[in-house]
Amino acid sequence: MPRFDRGDIAFVILSGGMVFLMVPGLAFLYSGLARRKSALSLVWVCFASNAVVIFQWFFWGYSLAFSPTAKNGFIGNLTHFGLIDVFGNPSPGTPLVPELVFSFFQMEFACVTAAILMGGIAERGRVLPAVVLIFLWTTIVYCPLAYWVWGTNGWAMKWGVLDFAGGGPVEIGSGVSGLAFSWVLGRRSEKELLNFRPHNVSIVGLGTSLLWFGWLGFNGGSAFGANLRAAIAIWNTMIAAAFGGAIWCLLDFRIERRWTMVGFCSGTIAGLVAATPSSGFVYPWASVIIGALAGAICNWATKVKFLIRVDDALDLFAEHAVGGIVGLILTAFFATPTVISLDGVNLSTPGGWVNHNWKQLYIQFAYVCATCAYSFVVTAILAKAVDSIPGLRLRNTPEAEKRGMDEIEIGEFASDYIEIRRDFTDGAAPFDSTDGKGAFFYPHVAAGDRHGRTEVSFGDPRPTEDQHHQPSDQPEPSHHIESVSEKTDNTVAPSSQ
């Protein structure tokens, strides 16, 4: 049995453990971004998908994604079904660590990818059918995507695609599939789109922090050893995340005049996503450009869902798919053999445009097109198929959507409380009741875009500071603030008599 460096083995095992922390990180992120009444269902489905993918990877997932004896270039065979003969031989991805360690590390990638996709059910999807779907999706979508670019005989691997840690299988796979999943599920009811906003931004920050920490293992561990390539991948990850967060926040400030925490977290994730395919190929100065462009382009991409009218509630497409595309395309420009060879293994891999390898751009572009098309079409077909099975309807009922997924699906709540109001418009709402029939206090705005102008400032009819102080010959009207117990109708004010 070959001898391996124990430091490399320990490093990859530790990195895999760090990647596992990204699953609860996603759970917290999604929970904080959702309404309170559906927050816990997103935590549950992230953890449930993690358990399902662990079984799938042990059962046949690893073999389908990495079996070295498959020759078709599309998907592996069942040579390692049930992890048969996966022990101490050099792994198919690198000679630096044994296959048993490599299979564990790659399993965590599959778990995180599945958890990302589960954000597509936000506030309207049933959790059991989603878990059934994720087993099928990991088998039919993720495993082929992984084999294309990382398998010994995968067509993208042989063609020379540069994808360090999963811009295709992980980011485009989850982001484009999330868009297809959301399209099959359909839009939330229009009432649920009104005044939609994150219910707990502190939890969003906590989830982003766990993701950032885990991403250091995600990208650093993809060098498969405690070497300089791992160190530069970690540096690139930090730089891209920092610049992505800063640019997104500045773009939001341009409109809002507020330093939004959700915006900073979203930009940080966009930078991390773009670093995924590029971090092991480029110099740190290139990650400044990659992170900044990812923050800007992903910010603008959040508007796409409105143009195509697909309710991608948690912006899986804008964050993960677009961020992965940005990272893959820019890798064609900035990849350099000097960085690639730092692991002591990949000594003959060509770089990108900085090394006059002009063809790398169309190779990367074709790979992006292939992964996007395959992910969307196959995921849509799978979701439609599962939805047609009796008892596995993906979409919940309108009444369940109104009451919340936590109450209907889970029976527990992320934040237990005594409910005195359910809708945004319930409760204390000021009306002009001088004539007993006032107008609604502020107009609804169909939101769903957590990065744009907030509802209280968009079309806000409240008087400006100057209007407050304008002299008037009319007497100051009395106002009645209705209490929760008085509230009966959002459109007709109670009489002050």
Image (cartoon, rainbow, N blue to C red):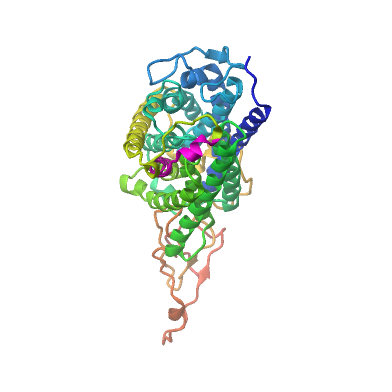
* Residue 187 lies within the magenta run: no
Relative to 6, does residue 447 appear above or below in the rendering?
below
Relative to 212, does residue 367 appear above or below in the rendering?
above
Q: Position of residue 343 (x, y in %)?
A: 55, 33
Specify the principal SS of the magenta part: helix
Nearer to the camera, 309 or 474: 309
Q: Is residue 437 left or right of residue 61?
A: left
What residue is drawn where x is 37% and y is 17%?
72
Q: Position of residue 467 (x, y in %)?
A: 43, 79
Nearer to the camera, 343 or 65: 343
Q: Is residue 435 left or right of residue 10?
A: left
What residue is drawn where x is 48% and y is 35%?
164
Nearer to the camera, 136 or 268: 268
Relative to 106, does residue 335 appear above or below in the rendering?
below
Whether residue 197 is visible: no
Q: Is residue 200 left or right of residue 462?
A: right
Nearer to the camera, 491 or 276: 276
> Magenta stretch?
324-342
Q: Position of residue 476 (x, y in %)?
A: 47, 81
Q: Is residue 368 left or right of residue 107?
A: left
Q: Quadrant of the N terminus?
A: top right
Q: Position of residue 119 (x, y in %)?
A: 48, 39
